Image (cartoon, helix red, strand yellow):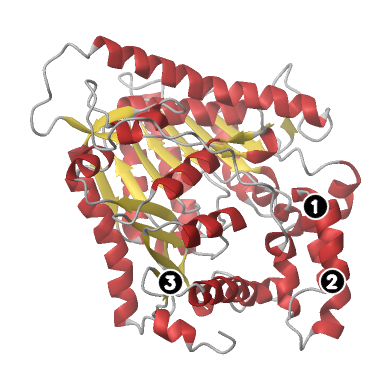
């Protein structure tokens, strides 16, 4: 059963990311006893089940054929995207898909050891176990080697984490990194992003762990000189061993690496700076995220971050204009477009939201969309697009048993049931509309593993669109990764759409 009507009315009337997050926790405590047999787990995600804000603004479709290739090699089908974000050209052969947590872990360690100029690690948090310590040790080795080697004396290591998650407990991400800060103060930077929504009385009352529901830094980018891994994985032991995620490695892609390095630096500039004595300070002249004015902080932060996006986009457009008269590229050269998207809604940045809506809107009957997520929590706006467009959808999410919160103590242990409630509501709509043949919902199940992969892939029948939007090599790798997940599930009793429909309550 859903939350009581009084709760729903309360959420609708006062909804904000901060207030609704706290109310959901308080509500769970108040209603746990009386609703134990009536699905009180749903209360954990009450803000998610409540009516969302209006869908992001729709970007008008460009005129012309979707598959027509422009003089700069960019299909008209995707040209609108280059008007909002930078469009980087990279060789498809330099884009690789890593398939396992161990591959991800070993790739990071190897590249940290050989980095000459920069290492940038942006994540939610850094764990405190042995595997995480080995990663820190790799950074220490690289920094020490840099000091001793006259050929690479300028190695800089920058770590961007979330303040609340990185400060949880007495031994935490901060204490893991303090020895590096103390030994290599001139080469090491640790930035801790603090959401502006957690402030005042709210910050004083909400305890550790629960305060992370208000908002966190969630960028997962791992950069080594001119190579970069874009992932959804955190720097924690389970993500290195048995927590399946997705990992896209771009080797020797300098412009893309520069963009993400600048982005992490910009977010770092608006964050708290960890000091060798474990205190934190703000850069001089920067508005404090929770002590300063909320609107002023957001405005300054938004300007700093969007400057990175705007300058990179302008630089790329200028380069494309200069290259229009050049001859076409030969086989094996730059043939893959990379469009980096940014989403920081508390700061008023919704680029990813706008682009995703446009992609889902444009997906026609000849298209197939693959969606993967460890948690089935599509917004109502996205649900309407999935149910209202003609594309075929294959949606892969975690079964309750491989949800990262399965078996957790306290209220967190009820979260998998809440996601099942959301999936059940969505699947009921699919059935009511008779769209079971178009929309397929799968659950990932693998004993002793959890599932955290998040990503979208779009495929059409127009070969020109596919060759520009996702070159053959990358297209096959992306599909291969999705099929890898499905094949793994089949080996371990995949719960298909038919099986999901038989789950109790569907």
- The residue closer to the viewer here, 41 or 437, is 437
- Decide which of tag 3 and tag 1 comes sooner along the chain: 1
The quarter holding residue 423 reads bottom right
Tell me if residue 206 can be seen: no
Give the residue pinned by disc 2: 5
**Residue count near mark 2 (Cα–Cα under 10 Å), binned few <14, some 14–19, many ≥20:** few
Label 1 Cα neighbours within 10 Å, binned few <14 / some 14-19 / many ≥20 = some
Q: Which mark is residue 15?
A: 1
Q: Quadrant of the N terminus?
A: bottom right
The quarter of the image holding the C terminus is: bottom right
Q: CA distance from mark 2 to mark 3?
A: 30 Å
**How far across and how far down the image is residue 262, in percent?**
48, 25
Q: Is residue 157 left or right of residue 203?
A: left
Q: Which mark is residue 484?
A: none
Q: Nearer the viewer, residue 375 or 413?
A: 375
Residue extending farthest right: 201
Q: Quadrant of residue 168?
A: bottom right
Q: Are marks 3 and 1 in contact (CB under 8 Å)?
A: no
As drawn, is 483 to the left or to the right of 453? left
Secondary structure beneath label 2: helix
Asked whether the viewer can see residue 180, the reply is yes
Which residue lies at the image location 38% right of the left edge and 55% below the top edge? 246
Element at label 3: loop
Q: Is 360 rendered above or below residue 182?
A: below
Residue denoted by label 3: 435
> Which tag is nearer the camera, tag 3 or tag 1?
3
Q: Earlier in the sequence, mark 1 or mark 2?
A: 2
């Amino acid at each position: 059963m859903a939350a009581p009507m009084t709760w729903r009315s309360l959420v609708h009337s006062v909804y904000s990311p901060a207030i609704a997050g706290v109310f959901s926790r308080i509500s769970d405590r108040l209603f746990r006893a009386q609703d134990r047999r009536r699905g009180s787990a749903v209360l954990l995600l009450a803000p998610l089940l409540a009516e969302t804000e209006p869908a992001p603004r729709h970007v008008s479709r460009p005129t012309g054929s979707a598959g027509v290739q422009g003089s700069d090699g960019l299909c008209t089908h995707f040209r609108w995207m280059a008007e909002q974000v930078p469009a980087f050209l990279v060789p498809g052969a330099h884009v690789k898909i890593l398939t396992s947590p161990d591959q991800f872990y070993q790739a990071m360690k190897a590249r940290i050891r050989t980095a000459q100029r920069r290492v940038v690690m942006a994540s939610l948090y850094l764990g405190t176990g042995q595997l995480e310590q080995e990663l820190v040790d790799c950074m220490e080795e690289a920094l020490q080697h840099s000091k001793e080697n006259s050929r690479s004396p300028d190695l800089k290591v920058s770590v961007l984490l979330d303040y609340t998650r990185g400060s949880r407990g007495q031994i935490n991400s901060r204490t893991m990194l303090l020895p590096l800060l103390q030994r290599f103060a001139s080469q090491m930077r640790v930035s801790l992003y603090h959401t502006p929504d957690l402030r005042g009385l709210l910050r004083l009352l909400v305890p550790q762990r629960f305060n992370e529901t208000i908002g966190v830094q969630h960028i997962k980018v791992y950069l080594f000189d001119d190579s970069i891994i874009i992932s959804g994985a955190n720097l924690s032991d389970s993500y290195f061993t048995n927590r399946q995620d997705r990992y896209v490695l771009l080797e020797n892609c300098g412009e893309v690496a520069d963009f993400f390095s600048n982005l992490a630096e910009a977010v770092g500039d608006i964050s708290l700076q960890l000091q060798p004595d474990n205190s934190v300070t703000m850069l001089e002249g920067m508005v404090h995220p929770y002590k300063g004015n909320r609107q002023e902080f957001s405005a300054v932060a938004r300007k700093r971050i969007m400057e990175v996006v705007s300058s990179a986009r302008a630089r790329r457009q200028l380069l494309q204009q200069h290259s229009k008269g050049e001859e076409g590229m030969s086989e094996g050269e730059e043939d893959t477009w990379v469009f980096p998207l940014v989403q920081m809604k508390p700061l008023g940045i919704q680029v990813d939201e706008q682009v995703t809506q446009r992609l889902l809107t444009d997906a026609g009957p000849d298209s197939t969309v693959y969606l993967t997520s460890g948690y089935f929590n599509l917004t109502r706006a996205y649900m309407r697009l999935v149910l209202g467009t003609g594309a075929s959808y294959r949606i892969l999410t975690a079964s309750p048993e491989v949800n990262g919160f399965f078996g957790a103590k306290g209220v967190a242990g009820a979260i998998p049931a809440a996601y099942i409630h959301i999936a059940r509501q969505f699947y009921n709509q699919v059935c009511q509309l008779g769209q079971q043949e178009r929309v397929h919902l799968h659950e990932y199940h693998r004993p002793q593993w959890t599932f955290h992969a998040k990503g979208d892939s779009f495929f059409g029948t127009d070969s020109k669109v596919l060759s520009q939007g996702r070159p053959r090599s990358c297209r096959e790798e992306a599909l291969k990764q999705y099929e890898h997940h499905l094949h793994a599930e089949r080996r371990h009793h995949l719960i298909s759409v038919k099986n999901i429909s038989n789950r109790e309550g569907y």
